[in-house]
Amino acid sequence: MMVTIDKILEKVEDLPSPDFVVQRIVQVASNPNASAKEVSQVISTDPSLSSRILKIANSAYYGIPRKISVLSEAVMILGFKTVRNLALSVFTYDRFFRKGDEKSPIDRKRLWRHFVVTAVIAETLASTVGYPVKEELFITGLLHDIGKIVYDVITPKILTSAYEVALKMKKTFTDVESDLGIPHHGIIGAKLLEKWNFPDLIVTTVENHHNPSSVRESVYSEIVSMVHISDVLANLLYPGDSLSFGDPHLDPEALNDISIKPKTLLNLLEKSKEMISKAKELLDM
Ligand SMILES: [Fe+2]
Ligand SMILES: [Fe+2]
């Protein structure tokens, strides 16, 4: 299959950017001096977004003991970064998952579940190892495979054939990409997030989530390894959701990067299952 990476990257440039409100939320939520009031003021300009954020904020996943009915409360209780994550989740879902080609064999509902499950495992893993900003793990986990949905939007034929080969040959999606000579979805996803002005941490992690050894000496080594591990676990929990069918390749060194024992992974898997069962509102947006 002859597709040049330049052609694809060119098309990525034409994809939609987050809505103005979402961009403002990301901006304000990244400013450590912003107040809860400012963050909620920005979100309140979009009533539908506000009510959806409140709905997810009240889900069992966040375990808030009483109902949050006002946005400023959600910001105060959950924090800027979580509210930013929820706004970006709603945006990503609406823009890329809500409607797709009905005749496509790609099951977007299951692909979305792979995004959410990876996000939940990544956030749970970050708490387990005491990573200081677990919210960054949630959003990076959520977006790690966004390159696949980019393929579906700009060249659905490529995604469909990669999917069909992976299914038939029982291969991983990444192996099929290299067999077919198509650019890796990590690179495509990173390109989109770069265009959206996402921080380097997230862009680099998305780009290298299948290959943590390539950033092992960098400051991003821990987060890349965490997303890598979470993706592997998500593929084991829901095989095929991510359009990948061979046994997922785990880089065993990734466990060393975050000083976690293989035995701890089993506990993480159990804890993650419990968290996923509480994340219904994120799964059924
Ligand atoms: Fe991936
Ligand atoms: Fe994945």
Image: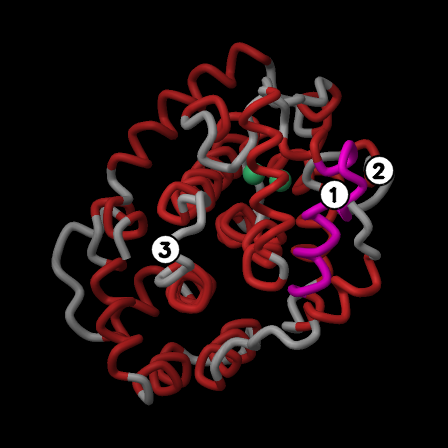
Kind of residue sitting beneath label 3: Glu
Residue 214, which numbered label?
2
- Nearer the observer, disc 3 or disc 1? 3
- Does label 2 or label 3 sit earlier along the sequence? 3
Q: Are marks 3 and 1 in contact (CB under 8 Å)?
A: no
Q: Nearer the viewer, residue 141 or 183?
A: 183
Which residue is drawn at the image coordinates 45% and 35% (left, top)?
241
Q: Nearer the viewer, residue 78 or 216?
A: 216
Q: Secondary structure at mark 2?
A: helix
Disc 1 target residue: 208
Q: Secondary structure at mark 3?
A: loop
Q: Is mark 1 within 8 Å of ligand 1?
A: no
Q: Secondary structure at mark 1?
A: helix
Q: Most prominent secondary structure in the magenta stretch?
A: helix
Residue bounds of the magenta highlight:
177-193
**Looking at the figure, which quarter contains the N terminus?**
top right
Residue 207 lies left or right of residue 138; in this view the side is right
- Few, some or many C-alpha atoms within 10 Å of disc 2 (few <14, some 14-19, many ≥20)? few
Quadrant housing residue 199:
bottom right
Q: Are marks 2 and 1 in contact (CB under 8 Å)?
A: yes
Q: Position of residue 218 (x, y in %)?
A: 84, 44
> Which quarter holds ligand 2?
top right
Kind of residue sitting beneath label 1: Asn
- Does label 3 or label 1 sit earlier along the sequence? 3
Q: What distance separates the C-alpha of mark 2 from that of mark 3? A: 38 Å
Residue 245 lies left or right of residue 52; in this view the side is right
Disc 3 target residue: 102
Residue 270 lies left or right of residue 211; in this view the side is left
